[in-house]
Amino acid sequence: MDVTLYTKDYCPYCKRAVSLLQSKNVAFNEIDVTHDETIFQEIKAKTGWDTVPQIFIDGEFIGGCDDLYALEQRGVLDDKLGIKKKH
């Protein structure tokens, strides 16, 4: 499972997204673009979004913090993250 977040260090939504993933004990790659305009421009060109966080799961752009929490609310985030449900 490959989870990547593009974040900025002052962004409260980025911190919320990171917190949710940490609470699920999911390994993820956080790419801080606060001081790296080149990478931020590249990811904006790829997604068409000019805000952070930008979250990818296995290469699929799922959106930002609200989108991540929406997946959690619908009960599908664990499946997307490959988390096995305990019976």
Image (cartoon, helix red, strand yellow):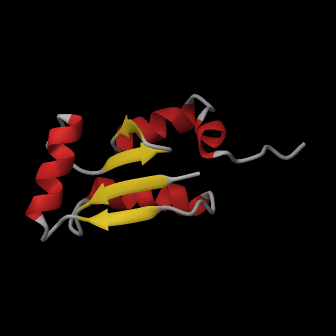
Residue at image position (59%, 59%) is: 26
- Farthest residue toward the top? 74
**Location of residue 57 in the rendering, given as x and y in whole percent from the top left corner:** 48, 44
Residue 48 falls in image quadrant: top left
Task: Decide: is 40 above or below 77.
Answer: below
Residue at 57% over, 28% down: 74
- The quadrant of the image that shows the C terminus is top right
User: Seen in the image, is 59 located left or right of residue 42?
Assistant: right
Task: Give the percent coordinates (x, y) of residue 13.
Answer: 31, 53
Residue at figure coordinates x 16%, y 67% from the top left = 34
* Residue 12 falls in image quadrant: bottom left
Residue 30 shown left or right of residue 35 in the figure = right
Could one spot residue 51 in this view of the protein?
no
Residue 76 in picture, x, y percent from top left: 61, 32
Please say if 16 is above or below 77: below
In front: 2, or 76?
Answer: 2
